[in-house]
Image (cartoon, rainbow, N blue to C red):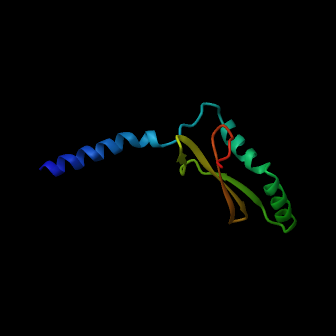
Amino acid sequence: MGADVIKSAAFLILLFCAPALACDYPDEGNLPLRRAVSRVRLLPQIEAWAQAMRRQGAAIQYAVLLDQPLRDKGRCYWPVEVRAGTQLWRRFYVTPEGKLRN
C-alpha cells in the first residue's frame, strides 16, 4: 500500500507542476509571434537562403511551435522552423522577447 500512495503522490505533483513547465505567453497579442519570426527571418543567412529558394520557386514558411517549448537555464524558447515548401531547413530557438538561443 505504501508504494501505491507514493506513486499517487508523485503523479499529483507532476500533474500540478506540468503547467509550470510550459512557457507563459505574454499578454501582447500576436506581437511575440511576429517578433520571433522577424528575428529569424532577418538573419543574413536566412535572407540569402530564402532568396535562393524563391528563385527556385519554393514557398518559404516560418512556423512558431508553441506546443514544443524548450527550457534552458530558466528561460523559455519557442522553436521557429524555417521551411522551403514541406522540407525543414533549420530550426531556431527564440524567446518571446525575440532573443536567439546561443
Report whether 62 appears left or right of 3: right
In this view, 34 is above or below 80 = above
Q: Locate residue 52, reporting x and y percent.
A: 85, 64
Residue at 29% in and 43% down: 12
In this view, 23 is above or below 82 = above
Report whether 96 appears left or right of 56: left
Q: How many marks?
A: 0
Q: Would you identify the image quadrant in which residue 16 lies?
A: top left
In this view, 53 is above or below 92 = below
Residue at 69% in and 36% down: 31
Report whether 90 appears left or right of 78: right
- Looking at the image, the residue that sits furthest to the right is 55
In this view, 57 is above or below 47 = below
- Looking at the image, the residue that sits furthest to the bottom is 56
Report whether 32 appears left or right of 44: left
Q: Locate residue 15, reporting x and y percent.
A: 35, 43
- Looking at the image, the residue that sits furthest to the left is 1
Looking at this view, is 101 or 16 the one in front? 101
Residue at 17% in and 51% down: 3
